[in-house]
């Protein structure tokens, strides 16, 4: 996920399966105190995690946010799920930032991509 307007917008590349995805779908509350700072910190933190492959994010004008995180294996996903800073942010998210959310975790069995030349 990047906020740099000069960077081209492209999805995370297809990887050789199997790998794992975590799909986090949210609706935020009005209270977003420190959300962007915490979110940026978590993005920096997860990038250093062995087995992290990338992240796609989209936000609708109506407020639905979807973040898809890609991990090479279940161990990498577990390491991220149990990271102390991530756990702290999860608690704060439930207390302040999210009206509601869902999390879906799946093992990818097929993956391909397309880029116009």
Image: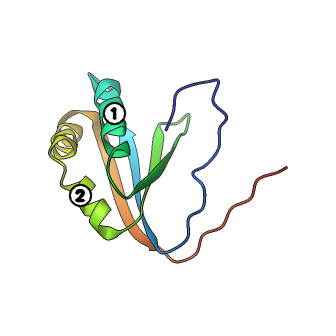
Instruction: Tell me whether circle 1 and circle 2 mark residues in contact (CB < 8 Å).
Output: no
The residue nearer to you, when weighing 100 against 104, is: 104
Q: Is residue 31 visible?
A: no
* Image quadrant assignment for residue 21: bottom left
* Image quadrant assignment for residue 102: bottom left
Residue at the extreme bottom: 109
Name the residue: 55% across, 39% down: 60
User: SS for tag 1?
Assistant: helix
**Colour basis:** rainbow
Q: Position of residue 103 (x, y in %)?
A: 34, 58
- Mark 2 crowd level (few <14, some 14–19, many ≥20, 10 Å Cα): some
- Mark 1 crowd level (few <14, some 14–19, many ≥20, 10 Å Cα): few
Residue bearing mark 2 = 79
Q: Position of residue 108 (x, y in %)?
A: 49, 72
- Mark 1 to mark 2 CA distance (whole Å): 18 Å
Q: Is residue 27 left or right of residue 93?
A: right
Q: Position of residue 58 (x, y in %)?
A: 53, 42
Q: Position of residue 106 (x, y in %)?
A: 41, 70
Indicate whether 63 appears above or below 84.
above
User: SS for tag 2?
Assistant: helix
Q: Is residue 53 visible?
A: yes
Name the residue: 17% across, 46% down: 87
Residue bearing mark 1 = 39
Residue at the extreme right: 117
Q: Is residue 23 left or right of residue 33?
A: right
């Amino acid at each position: 996920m990047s906020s740099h307007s000069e960077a081209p917008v492209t999805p995370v590349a297809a990887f050789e399966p199997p790998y794992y995805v975590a799909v986090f779908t949210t609706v935020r509350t009005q209270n977003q105190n420190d959300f962007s700072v915490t979110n940026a910190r978590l993005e920096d933190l997860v990038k250093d995690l062995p087995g992290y492959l990338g992240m796609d994010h989209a936000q609708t004008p109506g407020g639905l946010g979807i973040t898809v995180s890609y991990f090479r294996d279940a161990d990498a996903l577990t390491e991220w799920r149990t990271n102390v800073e991530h756990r702290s942010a999860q608690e704060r998210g439930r207390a302040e930032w999210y009206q509601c959310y869902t999390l879906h975790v799946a093992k990818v069995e097929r993956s391909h991509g397309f880029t116009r030349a």
